[in-house]
Image (tube, helix red, strand yellow):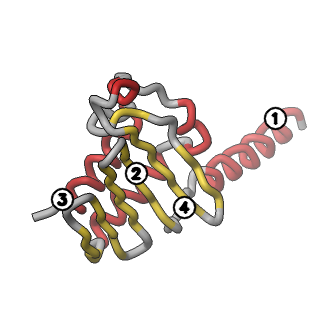
Amino acid sequence: MKYLKLIILFFFWAGSLSFCQEGIKDFDEIIYEARTRGSSLVLKITSDKLFYKDRNHEKELKVSKVDKKKLIKFINNTKLSDMSHFKAVSNDRASDRAMQAELIVKVNGQEYKSSVFDHGNPPEELKEIIETMMRLGKPE
């Protein structure tokens, strides 16, 4: 009887663990903003479009299924509620040597904001997604 209780408890635990790890299948928006006096950059990705705007360029592009999967993988591999605690690698934004940047991820009506960091030098945990976004939105 004792072993039966342990086996049942194990199956409940394993079932709840697999349910929690399923992850999201889509996101509302991912926004990367960088600004300083006189300059700004905004990259906004919705479920199928990317909007890019800086001082000299403005464009709208379609996001491929492959790139969308990469973004969803990042969201599922990152504890979004901890983004505000990710440490900035440098502090050049304090003296205007770099734009002040922030990442905002909106999923299922919830908004998650990163800590503020230097544009071009994000926290290690955000590096992959920001590099992907910059590659997608790079002006020609």
Q: Amino acid at mark 4?
A: Ile
Q: Which comes sooner in the sequence, label 3 or label 1?
A: 1
Q: Which residue is label 3 attached to?
A: 138
Work out how far the residue at label 2 is from the one at label 4, CA to CA, in angstroms: 23 Å
Q: Which residue is mark 4?
A: 24
Q: Earlier in the sequence, mark 2 or mark 4?
A: 4
**Height in image: 93 above or below 46?**
above
Residue type pointed to by label 1: Tyr
| Residue 3: mark in rendering | 1
Q: Position of residue 60 (x, y in %)?
A: 28, 75
CA gap, disc 1 and disc 4: 36 Å
Secondary structure of the residue carrying tag 3 is loop
Q: Which residue is mark 2?
A: 33
Residue extending farthest left: 140
Mark 4: few, some, or many residues within 10 Å (few <14, many ≥20)?
few
Contact check, label 2 and label 1, Cβ < 8 Å? no
Image marks 3 and 1: residues in contact by CB distance under 8 Å: no
Query: Measuring 61% from the left and 55% from the top, which residue is drawn there?
Result: 111
Secondary structure under badge 1?
A: helix
